[in-house]
Image: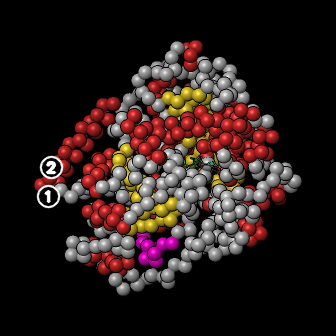
Amino acid sequence: MDFFKTLGAGAQFNRQKFRRDIEIFEKTDHTKRNGPANFDTSKVLPELDFFNQKDHSTGSASHPHANSTKVDTTPEESTGTALEDGSNSETDEPFETIEETGRFRNKYRIRIYGDKSIEPIKTFNMMFNQWKFRPAVQRNFKSIGFRHPTPIQMQAIPITMASRDLVACAPTGSGKTVAFLLPILQALDRPSKIGFRAVVVTPTRELGRQIFGMLEKLVAGTKLRVCFLAKLGGSVLGNANNRKKYDILVTTPLRLVHEIQHENIDLSTVQHLILDEADQLLELGFLEQMDTIIAACTHQHIRKSLFSATISSNVEELATSIMRDPIRVVVGIKNSATEDIDQKLVYVGQEEGKLVEVRQMVQKGIRPPVLIFVQSIERAKELFHELIYDGINVDVIHSERTKAQRDSIITNFRSGKIWVLIATELMSRGIDFKGVNLVVNYDFPQTIQSYIHRIGRTGRAGRKGEAVTFFTKDDLAYLKSIVNVMRSSGCDVPDWMLQVKPPSKGEKSKLKRKPVNRDLITTNPYQKRIKLQEERRKAKEKAQGKSKTSSGKSGPKATAVSEHSRKKAPQASLTLEEDES
Ligand SMILES: Nc1ncnc2c1ncn2[C@@H]1O[C@H](COP(=O)(O)OP(=O)(O)OP(=O)(O)O)[C@@H](O)[C@H]1O
């Protein structure tokens, strides 16, 4: 058995060039391999079919993990009413018994921890009638065209409407934005001129702008005033009176802290605080800022909601320390990718194998739009300079591009003018590119969370997508983490990958702290390479020097976040360099 051939499936290798790698792998002991993995990927797991696109009538028992989820689902329950055209047959009839509610939750793979008495909604009509949504909001919402609530919307909306704190974990592209925006709109009802009553915090300006866009659509004609704040320098808030005009704020942590520290903003009137991509906001990189923000939200009856596709138990623990008896909702398998993404791992030998592989993919014909993730701004620029000459409409987005450039790149990528977009971690979370056909992890992601969010830019809102992750021998130690995500979302995994040793805790945290040191992305001759490497080293030293001098003031007061989390919180995988500032 040529193990190296197996490894290289999907890539072409120069065996002479990669001789040393071949030797490494061929020395491996493969005698302990099991029989071939028997994964049936032809069926969509019901818990991952948020948009009810698949017929689950044959049940999910054929999936190897069908029984690994904690939800007990009888064949009858998983048969459900899902219709192939994406509609469902739920009616507005209220639930009659607790058991019926339980069955409904099971059917949509909704798990609820804490007070279970808050019933989910079956339809949007049910929601509008139950809480008497204002006609303008109903009209705006209907014009967007969503016919049926997704599972996270079914359960998260009633919980927030009941004024309960919430920690919600649901897969990428499953409609969390609407799940947190609709209850705010209903709760605020009319403009009050007392200042901000709801604040949505997101890690990046791009995601904030997207949420703001949806909010603007929903508030049209309601007189509620919404504000998006992410640009440092110059305040759109104006004088004290002007500030009071706004009801809802969408912002990034750095910008909000800046306003708090300059006493430009008063958060004591905030009754609804939403942290989108909450696990990232509660990691070390953002934690001090979140401390300041939470300390500034002093309203007695403030309600807090945390949303993300990935919420670790650390974050959950931390969350409970800043919330009042929160209810936790999990849709599907926690911290998993969606079934709609066909995931592949491709071994590329050494660094230069990646460029060869990308070019082969282009030659074979890729279906744009394609999103390519790399691990740093420098590498994004390097890859861009290679691909720009390949006759494809390619662009690159990272935090060193101006805000105007970033906005126009996103628009052009959405409209199809850009076919291939090279991106850093900045674009990995939340951004809703519905049509992305392929995500390429050119550089292996540093964390499982990063993997889930990156590939989650495709396969959204029930559409199909594909994700390809390149790996070199330097990434091999971390391979198993991704393999596990692939398996839990029903993807086929080659047998040999199942035998790879999982990374140790130490290896995982090492990678999280610092990405793998990689060779330049270039086809330039050797001398040029050395020169570029030297330039890169100097730039890095300069940047480090800068960040040391600018590491600044923290928030005025400590909250439970800081008390609890200094030791617990994981390091942010998106550094402040990649924040909006
Ligand atoms: N009920 C619905 N029916 C159909 N489409 C919906 C529904 N709710 C939301 N969508 C659409 O699904 C897409 C994904 O929604 P959204 O961006 O809120 O996902 P998300 O869960 O926040 O993802 P991520 O974790 O990546 O941030 C969007 O294009 C949104 O317009």
Q: Residue at x 38, y 72 (%)?
A: 10
Badge 2 is on which residue? 531
In the depicted structure, whether residue 2 falls above or below residue 170: below
Inspect the magenta stretch and tell me whether residue 496 lies in it. Answer: yes
State how the image is colored.
secondary structure
**Whole-percent x, y for residue 216 in the image:** 59, 33
Name the one closer to the observer, 50 or 195.
50
Q: How many marks?
A: 2
Name the one closer to the observer, 569 or 496.
496
| Image quadrant where residue 225 sits | top right
Q: Is residue 477 left or right of residue 456?
A: left
Inspect the magenta stretch and tell me whether residue 530 lies in it. Answer: no
- Image quadrant holding the C terminus, namely top left
Badge 1 is on which residue? 526
Q: Is residue 455 left or right of residue 313?
A: left
Binning the other alpha carbons within 10 Å of mark 1 as few (below 14), some (14 to 19) or many (20 upward) gives few
Q: Amino acid at mark 2?
A: Lys
In the depicted structure, whether residue 59 falls above or below residue 359: below
**Whole-percent x, y for residue 172 in the image:** 55, 53
Looking at the rendering, the stretch of residues picked out in magenta corresponds to: 492-503
